[in-house]
Image: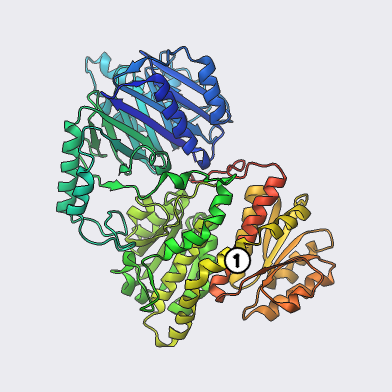
Amino acid sequence: MCGIFAYLNYNTPQDFEHVLQLLITGLRRLEYRGYDSAGICVHNGKPEIFKMAGNVSQLEKAVQEQTAIDTSIRVQSHCGMAHTRWATHGPPSTINCHPHTSDPDNQFVVVHNGIITNYLPLKQMLIKKGYQFVSDTDTEVIPKLAKYIFDLKMKDNIEPTFPEVISEVLRHIEGAYALICTSTHYPNELISARKGSPLILGIKSSDVDPQFISVLDAKMNNQPNFEAGKPRRGSFLGPLSPDNQTLYNRMVESQLQKSKTVEYFLASDSSALVEHTKKVLFIEDGDLVHFNKDGHFHFYSKNQGERPTREIQTLDMELAEITKGGYSHYMLKEIFEQPESVVNTMRGRVLWDKGQVILGGLKSKIDSIRRCRRLIFVACGTSYHSALAARQLVEELSELPVSVELASDFLDRKTPVFRDDTCFFISQSGETADTLKALEYCLSRGCLCVGITNTVGSAIARLTHCGVHVNAGAEIGVASTKAYTSQLLVIVMIAIKLGEDRLSKQERIHTIMEDLKILPIKIREVLALEDKVQEIARSIHHAKSLLLLGRGYNYATVLEGALKIKEISYIHSEGVLDGELKHGPLALVDETIPIIMVATRDSLFEKVQNALSQVTARKGQPILICSQGDEEMLKLPFKCLEVPTISDCLQGILNIIPMQLLSYHVAILKGLNVDQPRNLAKSVTVE
C-alpha cells in the first residue's frame, strides 16, 4: 500500500539538492506498491512540506518550481521524510496527501502507513479542544494529538522528551501503523514506530571499518544457512544463539555509537534501501525508535524503558533486481525472469543426485506436520491460487486432508482450528494484513504455523514457527508473476518432502523430481511463444468480457489467469471449472465472447474434451492452450498455443505463462499502466 522513505544524516555534510534527490529516488523505488499522491518534508530552519495528488515525477517538478530553499546550502545534520499515499480515508488530493501537520507552524509532522481505527473519537475530542482539521484522513489526528500532549505537559512545567510524547500518542491510537514523526521542538531528532505495517531501518556509517560487520558475520554465524548453504541470519534460516546474537548486536551498536558520521534510511520496503546500504534492522510490532540530535538511535518497546534486542541483517538483494534491466516494464522483466527464479527457488533444496528435497526451515517440524490431523493453506489473491494449484499433489503425497482458505473468509467464519492442525500462511510480501490476522488467530489456538514468503524478515517470517522462503527475488510489478510460479514450486517441494517416507509414493516422486530438473528449459520454450500470444492479444483486446476454462490442476491456472487479465487490462474475466459449465456458465457462451481453454494432456483430458464439445456446440470459438505436438487439438479450427508437456502437478507453471503474457500485451494495446494498475497496491497491509 502506501510507501514511507526517510533519510537522516549526522555530521555527514550534504547539500539540499542531494537530500531532495535522495527522498525523490526513495519514493520512486516504492512506486510499485501503488499510490495516488506523494509528498516530502525537509527542514530549512523550519519544516518545508511539498505534496500533491499525482505521481512522483509531478511532485519532483513541483518541488523544483516551488521551493524557496537554496539547494546549494550544505547541512551537517538533517532529517527528511517522504511518502506515497494510497487513498483510504478521503479521495486523492493535495490536502489529503502526507505529510500531515499539527498546526500552521508544523510543530509536529507525520507520515503514516496503515489505518487508525479510533480516529473519529480522537478527532472529535481534539476539535472540542480547538484544533482545526483540514483533511479527511485518519492520519491527521496523530500530529495534532502529539501537539495536544506536548502542550499539556509544558503547561504543567514538564518538559517531555520526544519519545515520551510519541509513546503517549501511541497509547491512545488503535489500529495499524508505520509512522515517522519530526518536530520543531526537537531539531534533528526523529521518531519511527510500527504496529502491523512494515518498516525497515538501514544503516550506513563511513567511520566504521568497512569489513568490520562482514568479518563479524563470519565469526559469529558459522552455522550454515539451511535454505541456501551460505551464512546468513533470519527467520527460517538458522538464527544465532541468543547469547551470540546479543553480543553481535552490542558490538555493532558500539561501533555505530562511536561513529561521528552516520546516515540512516527508513523505508517500508527493502527495495528503497538496497542502493544505499545492505545493513538493516527490521523494526517489529510495538517498537519505537528514537534518533537523537547526536545521531544515535535507541529502541523502546511497548513497556517504556525496556530496550529490545533487534537482529542486524544483511539484505540479500542487488540493485539490478529492482531496475527494469532493458525491459519496458517490471512485469515483463519478471515474467522473463521465471527460468532463473524457479532455479533460485530450488537451489540447495532439490538434490537430484540423492533424489532428495531438503527444506532446512522445516527440518525440525517435518515429523510433526506428517503426524497432524489436517493441513490448512491460508492466503489471498495470487498466493491463494498457488496453494489451490498444488492442493491435489499435497493430498496425494501426504495422504492428509487439505483445505485451502481465503484469509478474509477464514477469519469471517471463525473457522475451527485445533492443536493437531498445521496451517500454512502464504504471502509474497509476508505482510498481507488478512493473512497476518489469520496467523494470529491460529497461533492463539495452538496449531503449528508454517510461513511461505518471498521476504526475509517479514512479519509472517518472524511470527510463524517455521517456514520456507520462496527466493524468487524482488518482485516490483503489482501483478504477481514469478512469485506465483515459485510459491507453487515451494508447495510442490513441501508435498514431496511429506511423501518421501512412503514407499508407495517413490515412483511418483522420482518422476516429479526428474521433471523439476528440466522445468527451467520448458519455461524458456513457453516464453518463446510471445509473438503468438501478441497475435491473440490483438484479437481480443477490445473484448468486454472473457471466460477461461480449466480442470484439475489447471482450475487454479484459469483462476490466476483471469485475475491477471482483470488486474492489468481491466477486462472482466472469469475462471470457470470445466465441470461447472452446465451449472450456469454455459449460458454465457456464444460466438462473440472470447474463451481461453486449457486442454493440455493429463488424466482428465477426456473430460476436458467433453467441455470443449459443449462450448463448440454453442458456437463458441475457444483459444486453446494444448500440449506440444497434440495433432488432435491442432486439427481443430481454433487458435492454439502449444506448451511443452511435463508432470501434471508442474504443468500449471507452464500453462500460466501464456496467460501472464496475454494480460500484459492486452494492457499494452489498451495503453494502460502495466506496473501500477488503478486502485491496486503491491502490498495489501490493511484489511
Residue 213 versus residue 86 in the image, above or below: below
Q: Nearer the viewer, residue 71 or 184?
A: 71
Residue 631 versus residue 330 in the image, above or below: below
Residue at left offset 38%, top offset 39%: 273
Q: Is residue 547 left or right of residue 407?
A: right
Residue 261 appears in which quarter of the rendering? top left
Counting every numbered tag in the picture gives 1
Q: Which residue is mark 1?
A: 525
| Residue 619 at x, y percent in the picture | 85, 67
- For label 1, count other residues whose C-alpha is less than 10 Å away and answer few (under 14), some (14-19) or many (20+): some
Residue 417 appears in which quarter of the rendering? bottom left
Q: Nearer the viewer, residue 101 or 326?
A: 326
| Tag 1: amino acid | Glu
Q: Is residue 617 left or right of residue 413?
A: right
Residue 568: tell me if it is visible.
Answer: yes
In the image, farthest residue toward the front:
326
Q: Nearer the viewer, residue 132 or 526?
A: 526
